[in-house]
Image (cartoon, helix red, strand yellow):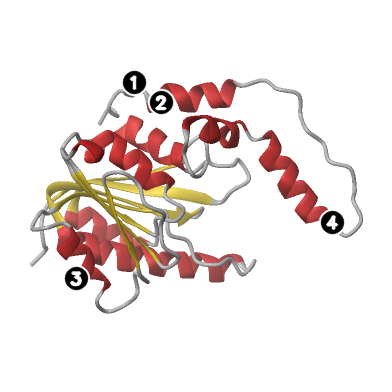
Amino acid sequence: MAAPEGRDGGGRGARSARGTRDLRVKLKKGRGRKTSSRRWLERQLNDPYVREARQRGYRSRSAFKLIETDDRFALLKPGGAVVDLGAAPGGWSQVAAERVGAAGGDGRVVAIDLHGVEPIPGVVCLKQDFYDDDAPDALIAALEGRRADAVISDMAAHATGHRQTDHLKIMALCEVALDFACKTLAPGGAFVCKVLRGGTEATLLDDMKRRFETVRHFKPKSSHDDSAELYVVAQGFRGEVK
């Protein structure tokens, strides 16, 4: 199946960020500054997506990951309802609100994060752990009777540095997010969730394929080349499997 054509707006911004050619900033070794910290800071200072995010008012460079994903798969429809899991600091919620028209009252975006999200026009922000027993009900209540057209998740567990452990932790998050999505999505809805390289576990992938018409992995260009992250994109929700 051919992927949908990219849309105007965010996609051009993502590409322009990639193509920016500025002189690289290189930090001197400072007393008390670890080599790893210096390298991280240098990457931030030289990252075109970080600069573009600041220029466009996005709270994080990860906003471009959702922009690219939506440009490719057309997940966020005008007037749609979206649930953003693990939303802090709010970059994905900002993009979702723009694309569904939430600020103008046409669409609706509900965001949840343990650390809270500073107010975003058109977004209902819940400060709560998604693992809390009452979190799903709180999200559903915030939708005010609507079924979600998309459930999006950029959640990631704290990395341990042990590849297999980190993979299992992020897959556990994906399983919980999928369970919520299947209880919340409208027929035809979409689900996006972060996983790690190596793809989605076979059993989870099989479950998604039973529940959705198409399931694909996608790595946005704005994702660091050395990052193991991927996104699983499921579209065409079939409804609860009996």
Give x and y (percent) for residue 157.
50, 66
What is the spatial separation of the Cα atoms under label 4 and label 2, in whole angstroms?
37 Å
Secondary structure under the numbered disc 4 in the rendered image: loop
Secondary structure under the numbered disc 1 in the rendered image: loop
Q: Quick check: can you spot residue 165?
A: yes
Q: Look at mark 3 in the image and give the residue it sits on.
A: 137
Q: Is residue 185 above or below residue 59?
A: below
Res 50 label: none
Give x and y (percent) for residue 193.
36, 54
What is the spatial separation of the Cα atoms under label 3 and label 4, in whole angstroms?
45 Å
Q: Is residue 186 above or below residue 21?
A: below
Res 33 label: 4
Drawn side of residue 62 relative to residue 18, left or right: left
Q: Look at mark 2 in the image and give the residue it sits on.
A: 11
Q: Look at mark 1 in the image and give the residue it sits on.
A: 8
Q: Amino acid at mark 4?
A: Arg
- Mark 4 vs mark 2: in front: 4
* Residue situated in front as seen by the camera: 122 or 84: 122
What is the spatial separation of the Cα atoms under label 4 and label 1, in whole angstroms?
42 Å
Label 2 crowding class (10 Å Cα cut-off): few <14, some 14-19, many 20+? Answer: some
CB contact under 8 Å: marks 4 and 1: no
Which of the image's four quarters has the C terminus? bottom left
Q: Amino acid at mark 3?
A: Asp
Q: Is residue 54 above or below residue 214?
A: above
The residue positioned 34% from the left and 20% from the top of the image is: 8
- Mark 2 vs mark 3: in front: 3
Give x and y (percent) for residue 53.
52, 35
> Which numbered disc, 4 or 2, marks the residue that appears first in the sequence?
2
CB contact under 8 Å: marks 1 and 2: yes
Secondary structure under the numbered disc 3 in the rendered image: helix
